Every structure is written in structure tokens, then in C-alpha cells.
Amino acid sequence: MARPLEPSALPVRIGRYLNRCVRIDTRSLALFRIVAGALIVADLLLRSRNFSYFYTEHGVVPRSVAMDATPDYAFSFYYLTTSTTLLAALFVLQGLIALQLIVGYRTRAAAVLSFLFVISLDHHNPFVLSYADTLFRLLLFWAIFLPLGERWSIDAVHRDAPPRPHVSTLASAFILSQMVVMYVVNGYHKSTSTLWTSGEATPLIMGLDDMTFLLAGILRQYPALLELGGLTWYYMLLFAWLLIFLQGRARLAFVAMFVIAHLSFALTVRIGAFPWVAITGLLPFLQRQFWDDATRLAHTAGIDTDRLASRLAALERLAASFPAYRLDSERLLAVRAGVYTFVVTVIAVTVVVLVALSLVQFAGVALDDDRDEEFEPDYPEEIETVAASLNIAQPDWSVFAPVPRTTDRYYVFPAKTATGEQLDVYNGGRPLTYDRPYDELQHQYGTYRERFYMNDVRRAGSSGDASRHLAEHLCETWTDEHGDELVQVNMYMVTEDITLETIADPANRERSTWLLYEHGCDGHEPATIDPPAF
């Protein structure tokens, strides 16, 4: 007969269980470090396609515009110069530090500097950001407090002691909780919309030509399958807290479901780096079970582990050739440890309070179904200052929620030239028409960040700086590029209402035009250029 538990045994077992829930395998941390560094490099390469347009004084977001759009105390290395050459050098430096993070050389310093450069670049152009950038900043912030260089790093080769198998700290709990908070809060937002609870949301989203690509066109033909997938995703979000409380293969299976879902997003919806950032955030959930199963699978597949071990040994010899700087003075070591502990404690406490206030106030809003105003958390000034300067405030995580967008968008910028000609200057200077510029509307954007930028232009309308600076940029550059002076520029958005019947039939959608902004070039008075009938 089983012996009954002593009164003190239950709290001990609960404590051990909770410890296992937030425990992160150091191999998973190493994989997170490598992928995070690779994402920084990839992001820099992708942003460089719009380097002059988005990040220099000659583009649509010069430094003054960026600084006006960010808090007065926003931190950015990129605010230190307006020189195009130096800005490009900062891009290169950020990439080199990311490579340092990937190989794990002076890993903690590389992680801190990578985080500071990431928030610096985000502050340098806040008009092209998305939830992917927000999530990546937060994940990278929590990672600063974790031993990212414990394994598979130059630091690990230089270390005398063997690597720890796992780590279980407040930081590990926070980085895991970050993903869960994002999923569950987004699931709550979706629960308030009948489109999500009925399954109709996903087919409608797949009808958005301006942001879908690759497999989306095929999947539109199977709305029932899309409804099933959407409902599955909705309930996964609501039960995402199981990512922490499940253990072993049960957790592994649930993580795999989220990874598969994000991969499906990457192949259907052009939402930037969000699927890859989310998958990176799921890596710390991989426990020892994953690595044990991967090893057994490698043996079963006949992979030569001895050859792999010899290659790893060669890499270790190469890593050992890097200089290992050590502080020999016990006093210096104590001072460094004290300063680091103080800084980490101040920032960590600030962010913990910030997160706690966000959740408490969000819970209060969730209980108030009669609210009329948009939810805006009210933080103490000191906490808000730190959060804004480091760009680590928690957003509302309303991705495609509560009500998903059910209108396609494209832009037409009618302009009059000095010779009286009317052109669409947003779509390559085509003869003025308000018809679709492309069969697939996502082709109207050179890069996905241009779509994020145009969202800010749309929101700014006639009252924001984004619209005015874009119009001024068009006026200034059009003559140089096309040899014809512009007199007036208008900005129109055209919308197409998507229904279940017109998901794959844009020609039969109802269209509307919206005048966002009108501008007079080089001292000319603004004038409205009326849209023709469709």
C-alpha cells in the first residue's frame, strides 16, 4: 500500500515540478543564441535593400522625423550621426557583433550590445516595425540574463568547468512566459470576435492579396480546410500556457504544433520575420527529451557521429586560438560582479513591474465589457521612461485580432506635373487610373517593411508627419529621376471588401476610395485630384 504523503512533501514536489517547468536545457539556449544572431544578420541584409530610402537623410525618414516619432529619451546609436557612410558603418558593426553572438565569444557583452543595436535600429525608423520586431526585442532582452555561451561557443571552450546541463532562474521563467503571454493575450482578443470563434477568419485573411503569397492562392480553394486550421490555431492560443506546464514528449508535441503553424504562416502570409522570430522564441522550450530523441534518431538514420565529433574537435581547436581575456584581480572581479548585479537588478525589477502592471490592467479591461475607449496601460513615470528608452514595453498583442482585416488595400498617388499631365506616382508613374496596379497586390511593395511603412502613412493621414515627408520626398526626387516637375500630389487608398464569396474573385468586390493626404510641391497650393469612377 502506498505511503501517504507527509504534509511537507507536497510543497516540495510542487516546487520541483515548477522548477522543471521553467528549466531550460543549455543546448537549447545555445541554439537560441545562434539563431537569434542569424536573425539579426538576416534582418540587416533585408533592411539594406531600402537603406537609402528608409535609413538616411536622403530618404523618407531622416533623423529628425525618427526622433519626433520616438520618446525624447529613446536610445539609439544611429542618432549619433546623419552621415550615410557612418550609418552604413553602424550597420556593418551591428552585423559583426551579431556574428560574435553566433560564435559565442564574450557572449554576454555580445548579447547586451546586440540588444542595444537592435533597439537603436528600431528607434532609427519606427515607421517600418511590426510585432516581429517587438517580440524579438523582448526575447533578446530576457536572453541577456541567461548563460547563452554555456555550450557550443568559444567561451565554453575557454571555460575550465564542464557546462551546466540546464538553467532554472527567474530569467528562464520570464523568457518562456514571454511567448505564453503573447499567445494567450492574442487568443483572448480573438475570443471576442465571432469570425475567429466560427472559423471564418482564416479564409478571409487568405483573401488579402496585399499580404498573402506562395501557397495562399492554392489554399483559398479549400475554405473548409482553412476554417479547421484557423479554429485549431485559436484553441492553441487559448491553451498556450500548457507550453510551460507540459513536460517531456507532451511538451515537445505541443511545441511542434506551434512550429508547424508558424511555418505555414511563413509560406502563406507576408508578415515579415514574425514566423521565424516566434520559432526562435519556442527553442528554449525544448527540453532534454528533444535532444535525447534527436540523438537516437541520428543513430537510427545511420549518421556517423564519430565523424561529427572529429569536426567538432577541429572547431574547438579553432575556438581555443581566440584570446581569452581574464580579470585576475579578485577586487576587479568583485567590482564587475557588483556593477553587473546592480544593473541587472534595476532593469529586471523595472521590467517585472512593467509586465505585472500590464497583466493586471489588461485583466481589469478584460472584465469590463462596456468600455468605449482603447486600452492604454497607465505606468508610473519612471517605469515608462525605462521601458520607452529601451523599447521593451509590452504591446497589446492584437495580431489579426480582435477582428481580422477583411479589406484588401492598395495605394494610388495621383499627381499633376508642370505640363498638366496626370500620373500615378506611387505605382511607377503609370497613366492615372484607380484600377489595381498588380493582379497580386503584395507586389505593390518592394519589401514587406514598405507595407508596414505605408500602414503608418495611412494612419497618419492628413495630420501626421509620415504623409507629409513621403509627399515631399516624391516631389524632390521625381524631377531628378524622371525629368518632369510635380505640382500637386494626392494620396489615395483604395479598399476592396472581402467576403467568403469573393476570396478568390477580386473583380467582384466592392471598392471604395479614401483620400489620405494632399500636398503642393515646391510652394504650390495643395489641390484635390478627384478619383475617376471604377
Image (cartoon, rainbow, N blue to C red):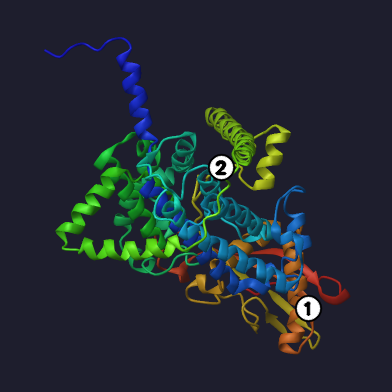
Q: Dot 2: what SS?
A: loop
Q: Quadrant of residue 499?
A: bottom left
Q: Residue at x 63, y 63 (%)?
A: 453
* Percent coordinates x, y for residue 33 in the rendering: 45, 54
x, y (%) of residue 116? 63, 53
Residue 457 horizontal side relative to residue 305, left or right? right
The three-letter amino acid code for the residue at tag 2 is Asp
On-image quarter of the C terminus? bottom right
Q: Using a 10 Å C-alpha cutoff, classify the residue at mark 1 as few (fewer than 14 neighbours), some (14 to 19) or many (20 or more).
A: some
The single residue placed furthest to the front in the displayed view is 329
Placement of the N terminus among the 4 image quadrants: top left
Determine which of the numbered discs, if any, sits on residue 476 in the image. 1
User: To which quarter of the image does residue 500 belong?
Assistant: bottom left
497 vs 13, left or right, is right
Compare residues 6 and 463 and report the one nearer the observer.
6
Of 435 and 328, the residue lying toward us: 328
Task: From the viewer's perspective, tell me whether residue 30 is left or right of residue 417.
Answer: left
Q: According to the image, label 2 marks what residue?
A: 396
Identified at 75% across, 90% down, the residue is 483
User: In the current view of this chain or complex, which residue is farthest to the right?
Assistant: 523
On screen, residue 289 versus residue 386, left or right, reads left
Q: Which residue is depicted at the point 40% across and 42% down?
A: 237
Question: Which label's residue is closer to the chain start, 1 or 2?
Answer: 2
For disc 2, the neighbor class at 10 Å (few under 14, some 14 to 19, many from 20) is some
Q: Secondary structure at mark 1?
A: helix
Q: Which is more toward the observer, 500 or 175?
A: 175
What's the distance in space between the residues labelled 1 and 2, CA to CA?
Answer: 38 Å
In the rendered image, residue 414, in percent from the top left (x then y), is placed at: 70, 76
